[in-house]
Image (cartoon, rainbow, N blue to C red):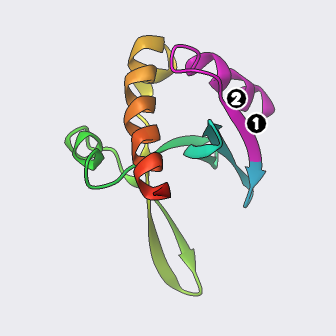
């Protein structure tokens, strides 16, 4: 898992510097102190809101969901497209959208 987390620094290099923190058995991915992505079960998810979620839905990308006390919890993080792992420019586009969602949520 650590190699994958380290690799995300390269994936997002055109977007800007990122930091990572362990959380809830996964990792939060941060830029300028705001979490815009997370890794759970070895899968990268990006932050969404009403302004950028259509991009994810159009690509057929599912949300991060988990069960808590018998209830299904759907989060505001959606699976990242696989293509961004090998395309720094595309990764920067998706990261900017998700970081913008994180900024909006923070206000």
SS state under label 1: loop
The residue shown at (76%, 36%) is 1
Residue 47 in view in this figure: no
Circle 2 Cα neighbour tier, 10 Å, few/some/many (<14 / 14–19 / ≥20): few
Instruction: State the image quarter where residue 59 is shown.
Output: top left
Quadrant into which the C terminus falls: bottom left
Q: Position of residue 83 (x, y in %)?
A: 40, 21
Does the magenta segment cover residue 42?
Answer: no
Tell me the CA gap for discs 1 and 2.
5 Å
- The region drawn magenta spans 1-21
- The residue tagged 1 is 1
- The residue tagged 2 is 4
Horizontal side, residue 59 vs residue 1: left or right: left
In this orientation, which residue lies closer to the viewer: 29 or 26?
29
Does the magenta segment cover residue 14?
Answer: yes
SS state under label 2: helix
Q: Position of residue 51 (x, y in %)?
A: 25, 48
The residue shown at (78%, 49%) is 22
């Amino acid at each position: 898992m650590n190699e994958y987390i380290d690799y995300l620094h390269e994936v997002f290099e055109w977007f800007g510097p990122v930091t990572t923190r362990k959380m809830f058995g996964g990792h939060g991915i941060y830029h300028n102190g705001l979490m815009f992505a997370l890794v759970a079960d070895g899968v990268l998810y990006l932050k969404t809101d009403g302004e950028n979620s259509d991009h994810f839905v159009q690509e057929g990308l599912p949300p991060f969901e988990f069960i808590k006390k018998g209830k299904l919890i759907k989060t505001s993080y959606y699976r990242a497209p696989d293509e961004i792992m090998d395309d720094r420019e595309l990764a920067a586009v998706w990261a900017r959208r998700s970081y913008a969602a994180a900024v909006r949520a923070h206000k």
